[in-house]
Structures are given as structure tokens and as C-alpha cells.
Image: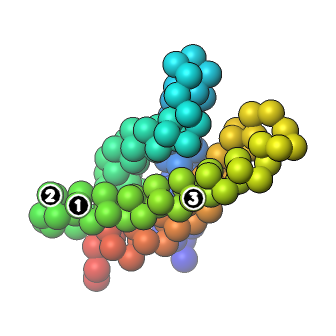
Amino acid sequence: MKKLFEQIIKFGLVGFLCFFIDYGIMVALTELVGINSTVSSGISFCVSVIVNYILSVTVVFDADKEANKAKQFIVFLILSVIGLGINTLIMWAGTGILDQYMERSYMLVKIFATAVVMVYNFITRKIFIEKKN
């Protein structure tokens, strides 16, 4: 139980860092470059996935050190693409609903999308990335 709690804390810290990377790039691309928020959210999500993979296999999970790294990254990438789909769907639906009521609704929707995807990520990475005893 202690190990699980430590993993959740580490995952939260890594997630927090990757959220700021994701959120910062999304806002910069949307506000400074003028890219559509759904597109910029996808781009920023992809950048944060790379950082997240590196930190997940080195700091958070007890990843199998002898596992095929290419295969491990492909599994991580597939899980992340599913997460990206969830993220994009929430961004699209959420901004579609809230844009009529508030400016820059994408900022609020992104926080909700990140929370949903974070839960999905922890569960799937624990199942597929962590070394089996």
C-alpha cells in the first residue's frame, strides 16, 4: 500500500509538471500564434507525452528494465493516443458548449480534460508499463 501511495504522489508530481508543459504550450500556441485551441491542445499534449514517458519509466513506475524499450514506448504511445482522443473529445465538446457562455472557455475545459485523462493514464500505465512480479 505504501508503494502505491508513493507512486500516486510521484505520478501526481510528474503529472503536475506535464500539465504545466501541456497547458503552457497550448495557451502560447493559441494566444501568441493564433492556432485553434483544439489543435494547439493536441500539439501541447504530444509534447507533454514525451516528457511524461521519460519520467514515468524512470521515476514513477517500476518499469521492467529488461523490457524492449521500443515496444514499451509503443504501448505507452498507444495509451497516450487514446488519452489524446479523450482529451480532444472533451476539448471539442466542452468548448462547443461553454464558448457561448464565456470567453476563453478552453482554459477551464482543459483543466477538466486533464483530470479525466490523468486518471485514465495512471490506471493504464500501472497495468501496462509496470513490471509484473
Identified by mark 1, the residue type is: Ile
In 3D space, how far apart are the residues under numbered discs 1 and 2 (Cα atoms)?
A: 6 Å
Q: Which mark is residue 89?
A: 3
In 3D space, how far apart are the residues under numbered discs 1 and 3 (Cα atoms)?
A: 22 Å
The number of numbered discs placed on residues in the rendered structure image is 3
- The residue positioned 57% from the left and 59% from the top of the image is 89
Q: Which residue is at the front of the view, 12 or 53?
A: 53
- The residue positioned 87% from the left and 43% from the top of the image is 101
Give residue 7's position: percent from left, percent from top.
Answer: 49, 62
Label 2 sits on a secondary structure element that is helix
Question: Around disc 2, counting alpha carbons within 10 Å, would you say few (fewer than 14), some (14 to 19), or many (20 or more)?
Answer: few
Look at mark 2 in the image and give the residue it sits on.
Answer: 70
Give residue 93's position: percent from left, percent from top.
Answer: 66, 57
Q: Which mark is residue 1?
A: none
Give residue 54's position: percent from left, percent from top.
Answer: 32, 47
Going from N to C along the chain, the mark reached first, 2 or 3, is 2
Look at the numbered discs 1 and 2 and tell me whether their residues touch, using CB distance below 8 Å: yes
Identified by mark 2, the residue type is: Ala
Look at mark 1 in the image and give the residue it sits on.
Answer: 74
Visible in this render: residue 17? no
- The residue positioned 53% from the left and 49% from the top of the image is 15
Which of the two marks, 1 or 3, is nearer to us in this view? 3
Q: Which residue is at the front of the view, 103 or 130?
A: 103
User: Which quarter of the rendered picture does the C terminus lie within?
Assistant: bottom left
Q: Tell me the quarter of the picture where residue 70 sits.
A: bottom left
